[in-house]
Image (cartoon, rainbow, N blue to C red):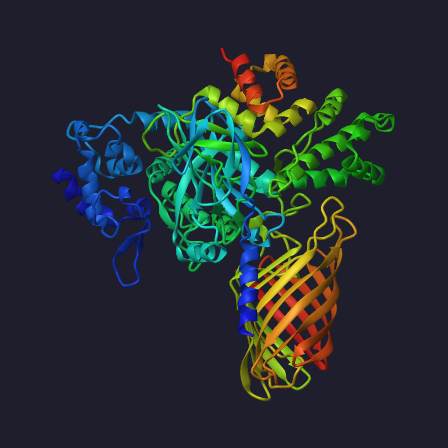
Amino acid sequence: MDVLLIQSAEKELYESRTWNLLLKYKKRPFGGYLSQADGMEFFNSPAGKTNPRLELAETLRSFFTLPVDIPSTESHPQCKFPARFKWLNRQLSFDPERLPFQNCGLLKQWLKDLDPKGATLVFASQFMSNPVSMFGHTLLRIDSGKTGPHNELLDYGVNYAAKTDTKNAALYAMKGLGGLFKGHFSVFPYYAKVQEYSDFEGRGLWQYEINLSEDQLEYLLLHLWELGGAHFDYFYLQENCSYHILSLLEVANPTLHLTDRFLFSVIPADAIKSLTAYEGLVKKVSYRPSVFNQLNHKRGLMDARERQIFSEVVKNPSLVHQAEFRNRSVSSQALILDSYLDYLQYKGAKSRNEKTRTNSIRRSVLSARSELNYKIKDGRVIEIFSSSGWGFAARPDLGHGTDRVRFGLGRNDDEPFQEFAYRPALHDLLAKDAGYDRDSEILVFDFKFRYFNETERFKVDKAKLLGITKLNPHDPLYIQPSWRLDLGVDVLRDIDCQYCNSFRGDFGMGYSYRPQFFSSFLIFGFLDVESEFSGRLDESYRLGAKAEIGAFVELTENWKIQITGGYKNFFFGDEKDFFTASLNQRASISQNIDLRFEFHRHDQNNEGVFGVNFYF
Amino acid sequence: MRNFIYLTLLLFLASACATIISGTTQEVTFDSEPQGVQVTVNAKVLGKTPFAVQLDKKADQTVEFYLDGYKRQTRQLTTRMEGWFWGNIVIGGLFGSTTDGATGSIHEYSPNQYYVTMVAGSSSSVMAIKPEKAKVKEFIVANYDKVITDLAKGEGEYLDSLLAILKVQDSNRSDSINKIKSLSENHTNIPEFAEQVAVSFSN
């Protein structure tokens, strides 16, 4: 034992990157270490959470424990911490005569059952009706040799999630941001997560197969075994699903620095970029479309007549047994029936949320399909290597960065100005939508400052706390309104008060329409409730409504225009009514840079800005 | 003024984190593999699977599934959160998490009908081993819609996976598909269908 301690001290093993990764130590700002793991079962030393050296010593000591001294309900430390054992053995070359190697039956059985051959990072893209889910979710899939390359449903997935104990919305948010929920790892059949994300939530799954050697993969799994009993304080922003999954990969291959670049927060889409930044780390990318995506893909394949028949079948499924339908070609019947079956699954999943839940597939439709005896190669898992995606989605790692810095030059009726803006997340409607939801916008903490040259003033132009817009363009199958909200500091733009600030809160509903699924043209209309508070208003506030219509046009893949016109009428407080208009353009010159040309008019006040956005 | 701000903020928070659980009680059916699992809510015994019961739909209740020789499963009647920000708020079903491999799993195979898979053993681990029969049944119950759709089409990923899990050889593929298809027509109760398939294909 002492020999080992001396050796480990000589090699300063407790300071090595691998030891820190295994024990989740992070350097504290004023010196010392702190492990992110929060359950005492994770440590062998009572001081383990803050003392890597003591923890290593105690861990070594624990390996010598005699089996008789272990209670029947517990495992031997060698079996509880097999990754630590493997690594320390490799560094110190344990002598089995002096330190007996225990037989870890349960661990061996687990590894045998998993039969691991590889690991895949899975990214769940945005949720149909919740724009905030654009941030995404990541989990890891362990690819098993037992099931073969085409049976990934039977593989196992690894997830890091929080156990929440409150339904209260405010507590929920506070606890999540403040790390008051406990997060833990769990392992489960991959099909269960495919069902949850892809079917129930309508999210496409991007699968990034990672290049790991057999040895690296073993480390990953042994470490996962160690983590089984541990829990961590779950922080929405920092120590979330992506952070912990990336940490697992770092343990597998300590030369990877996947979590270092994240200063403030780990957004899942950025986690993927961490991986793709390493050349050769990602072997293959494939896409598993959600049921809704599959349905839309099929609708895209139909001709106008078929689309019409499909909507009739949706209203009256018994049509599929009638002569008019049966007389169609087998392939046409199959396309419509398969679409209807997709639709039923989609609807069944959606209605899980509602009070009235429909039972899923009708036997009659199944037998109609069965009688056709026709096989279509439908899109199961599609391999996407290029950025063009699959009609509905482009790879998340090909999207613009989540942080945005902006420099601008502008002019209003009176003087020129320069502007600087920063926003940590996430995506606006005019930006290039590759990797994001085309019809959603989320802006978090968007701060903009301007310096006016003639009056020599430096002012806050905008401090938006949160802005969300969900367009939900018209879909005959599922009609939903558009909605948006906006909260934050702004400027009273229609009033000449030397750019005085106000606090605004707006909420609006409306409708959007796109002629066809992939159309580059969209029109929208909104009716918003607007409230504005400012010391510079006579009554200190104004409250009213805005009616706005507008359109988005994508002229090319990299050039998008937005035109809007609105009418505001404040009925309460400082009463006023006036018109607004804007014309904005975005030209993308690379994945992470775009140019903006903006013109705005508020009542009699005009301004024009040329801006450059850098995303990272 | 101030009240308006508070109201707006509250409305926003409430709508962003809306949970879907509503109503007071709900008739719920429990079935399991193996059967005979004791189900308790807040320490009160409700029955042994398979059975149906009226469940109080308030949150923060603990439902436990207990069977001698198997790991006890504990579920909360509450929401579960994963991912980023308010990204995923679980929807559908009364139980927060459907799968937690270490102690077993629970699937809602039909509205308010739950199928619980128990895992043998008593020590804690990341994932314990399920016997083959339990795996087969769980797959069928959890993915029923997909399986019968693939059966109707004569092909599909879920059908392939089912055949793999049943260890069907390529030479027996079409016979096996026909066998499973006729079983699905004769047994419309989902857990029963799963049982029949598992039994028919066990060697």
**Percent position (x, y) of residue A347?**
67, 39
Q: Is residue A553 left or right of residue B1?
A: right
The answer to whether A315 is drawn above or below residue A600 in the figure is above
Quadrant of image for the N terminus of chain A: top left
Label total for image: 0
Q: Is residue A62 left or right of residue A600?
A: left
Residue at the image point whose x is 71% and y is 46% from the top: A478
Q: How far across and how far down the image is residue B18, in percent?
A: 55, 52
Residue A581 vertical placement versus A90 (above, below): below
Residue B201 visible at all: no
Q: Residue at x 71, y 75 (%)?
A: A569
In the displayed structure image, the side of residue B81 where residue A255 appears, left or right? left
Q: Is residue A242 visible?
A: yes
A554 vs A340, nearest the viewer: A340
Judged from this view, the residue extending furthest toward the top is: B203
From the viewer's side, name the closer residue of A249 and A92.
A249
Task: Please provide percent x and percent y for residue B130.
Answer: 43, 24
Q: Which of the 4 image quadrants contains residue B181?
A: top right
Q: Position of residue A160 (x, y in %)?
A: 43, 43
* Res. A405 image quadrant: bottom right
**Would you place residue A307 above or below residue A153 in this image?**
below
Judged from this view, the residue extending furthest toward the left is A2
In the visual, does A571 lie left or right of B117?
Answer: right
